[in-house]
Image (cartoon, rainbow, N blue to C red):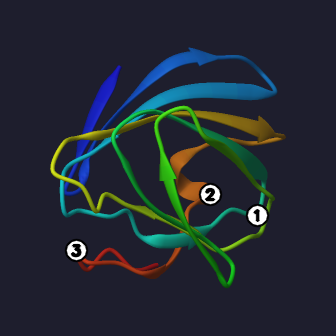
Amino acid sequence: MTEERPWGKFEVLLEESDYKVKRITVWPGRRISLQYHKQRSEHWHIVSGGGLVTIGDRHLDMKRGESIDIPRGALHRVHNTGTENLVLIEIQRGAYMGEDDIFRIEDDFGRLN
Protein backbone atom coordinates (compact mmCIF):
# COMPACT_ATOMS: atom_id res chain seq x y z
CA MET A 1 0.00 0.00 0.00
CA THR A 2 1.53 3.33 -1.10
CA GLU A 3 0.09 6.70 -0.09
CA GLU A 4 1.04 9.98 -1.74
CA ARG A 5 1.57 13.09 0.38
CA PRO A 6 2.41 16.68 -0.64
CA TRP A 7 6.01 16.12 0.60
CA GLY A 8 6.50 12.67 -0.98
CA LYS A 9 5.03 9.24 -0.25
CA PHE A 10 5.09 6.27 2.07
CA GLU A 11 4.58 2.55 1.68
CA VAL A 12 3.61 0.17 4.48
CA LEU A 13 5.98 -2.79 4.20
CA LEU A 14 4.78 -4.76 7.23
CA GLU A 15 2.11 -4.30 9.88
CA GLU A 16 1.69 -6.40 13.02
CA SER A 17 -0.30 -5.78 16.20
CA ASP A 18 2.54 -3.98 18.02
CA TYR A 19 4.74 -2.60 15.22
CA LYS A 20 4.61 -1.26 11.67
CA VAL A 21 7.36 -0.81 9.07
CA LYS A 22 7.17 1.93 6.39
CA ARG A 23 9.38 3.12 3.55
CA ILE A 24 9.12 6.92 3.48
CA THR A 25 10.30 9.02 0.52
CA VAL A 26 10.70 12.79 0.96
CA TRP A 27 11.24 14.75 -2.24
CA PRO A 28 14.11 17.27 -2.53
CA GLY A 29 13.35 20.54 -0.73
CA ARG A 30 10.28 19.11 1.03
CA ARG A 31 9.68 18.30 4.67
CA ILE A 32 7.05 16.51 6.70
CA SER A 33 5.04 18.38 9.30
CA LEU A 34 6.47 19.13 12.73
CA GLN A 35 4.52 16.50 14.65
CA TYR A 36 4.28 14.16 17.59
CA HIS A 37 2.48 10.93 18.45
CA LYS A 38 0.65 10.01 21.65
CA GLN A 39 0.57 6.25 21.08
CA ARG A 40 3.84 5.28 19.42
CA SER A 41 7.58 5.73 19.20
CA GLU A 42 9.52 5.56 15.94
CA HIS A 43 12.95 4.52 14.73
CA TRP A 44 14.23 6.06 11.48
CA HIS A 45 17.03 4.59 9.35
CA ILE A 46 18.17 6.62 6.33
CA VAL A 47 18.69 4.33 3.32
CA SER A 48 19.40 7.01 0.68
CA GLY A 49 19.86 10.73 0.50
CA GLY A 50 20.04 12.87 3.60
CA GLY A 51 18.63 15.86 5.34
CA LEU A 52 17.90 17.67 8.55
CA VAL A 53 16.14 15.72 11.31
CA THR A 54 14.55 17.69 14.14
CA ILE A 55 13.73 15.98 17.45
CA GLY A 56 12.64 18.38 20.17
CA ASP A 57 15.19 21.19 20.17
CA ARG A 58 17.91 19.11 18.44
CA HIS A 59 18.66 19.56 14.71
CA LEU A 60 20.78 16.80 13.20
CA ASP A 61 22.22 16.49 9.70
CA MET A 62 21.73 12.84 8.83
CA LYS A 63 22.76 10.78 5.82
CA ARG A 64 22.61 7.28 4.40
CA GLY A 65 23.35 4.58 6.97
CA GLU A 66 22.44 6.66 10.03
CA SER A 67 19.58 5.95 12.44
CA ILE A 68 17.73 7.73 15.21
CA ASP A 69 15.07 6.93 17.80
CA ILE A 70 12.07 9.20 18.25
CA PRO A 71 10.41 8.73 21.65
CA ARG A 72 6.64 8.77 21.99
CA GLY A 73 5.47 12.38 22.46
CA ALA A 74 8.63 13.99 21.01
CA LEU A 75 8.22 16.73 18.41
CA HIS A 76 9.95 15.63 15.21
CA ARG A 77 10.35 16.34 11.51
CA VAL A 78 12.58 15.40 8.59
CA HIS A 79 13.55 17.91 5.88
CA ASN A 80 15.18 16.78 2.64
CA THR A 81 17.84 19.44 2.13
CA GLY A 82 19.50 17.57 -0.74
CA THR A 83 18.94 17.22 -4.48
CA GLU A 84 17.90 13.55 -4.52
CA ASN A 85 15.07 11.75 -2.79
CA LEU A 86 15.55 11.07 0.90
CA VAL A 87 14.38 7.53 1.68
CA LEU A 88 14.07 6.20 5.20
CA ILE A 89 12.75 3.08 6.83
CA GLU A 90 10.48 3.88 9.76
CA ILE A 91 9.71 1.30 12.45
CA GLN A 92 6.74 2.30 14.60
CA ARG A 93 6.25 0.65 17.98
CA GLY A 94 3.28 1.06 20.28
CA ALA A 95 -0.26 0.17 21.17
CA TYR A 96 -1.73 2.08 18.20
CA MET A 97 -0.14 3.14 14.92
CA GLY A 98 -2.97 4.71 12.92
CA GLU A 99 -2.50 7.84 10.82
CA ASP A 100 -4.86 9.71 13.16
CA ASP A 101 -2.15 9.56 15.85
CA ILE A 102 -0.31 12.37 14.03
CA PHE A 103 -0.59 15.72 15.83
CA ARG A 104 0.77 18.47 13.58
CA ILE A 105 2.23 21.63 15.12
CA GLU A 106 3.57 23.17 11.87
CA ASP A 107 2.87 22.13 8.28
CA ASP A 108 3.95 23.58 4.93
CA PHE A 109 0.72 22.33 3.32
CA GLY A 110 -1.95 23.65 5.74
CA ARG A 111 -2.73 20.29 7.36
CA LEU A 112 -2.84 21.33 11.01
CA ASN A 113 -4.98 19.44 13.52
Label ID, residue 101? 2
Q: Position of residue 77 (x, y in %)?
A: 50, 66
Mark 3 vs mark 1, CA separation in Å: 22 Å
Q: Is residue 80 left or right of residue 59?
A: left
Q: Are marks 3 and 1 in contact (CB under 8 Å)?
A: no
Identify which amino acid the numbered label 2 is placed on. Asp
Label ID, residue 17? none
Mark 3 vs mark 2, CA separation in Å: 18 Å
Which quadrant is the N terminus positioned in?
Answer: top left
Residue at the disc numbered 3? 109
Residue at the disc numbered 1? 38
| Mark before the other along the chain sequence, 2 or 1 | 1
| Mark before the other along the chain sequence, 3 or 2 | 2
Q: Position of residue 79 (x, y in %)?
A: 37, 63
Instruction: Look at the numbered disc 1 and give the secondary structure of its residue.
Output: loop
Quadrant of the rendered image containing residue 70: bottom right
Residue at image point 78% right, 54% down: 39
Q: Are marks 3 and 2 in contact (CB under 8 Å)?
A: no
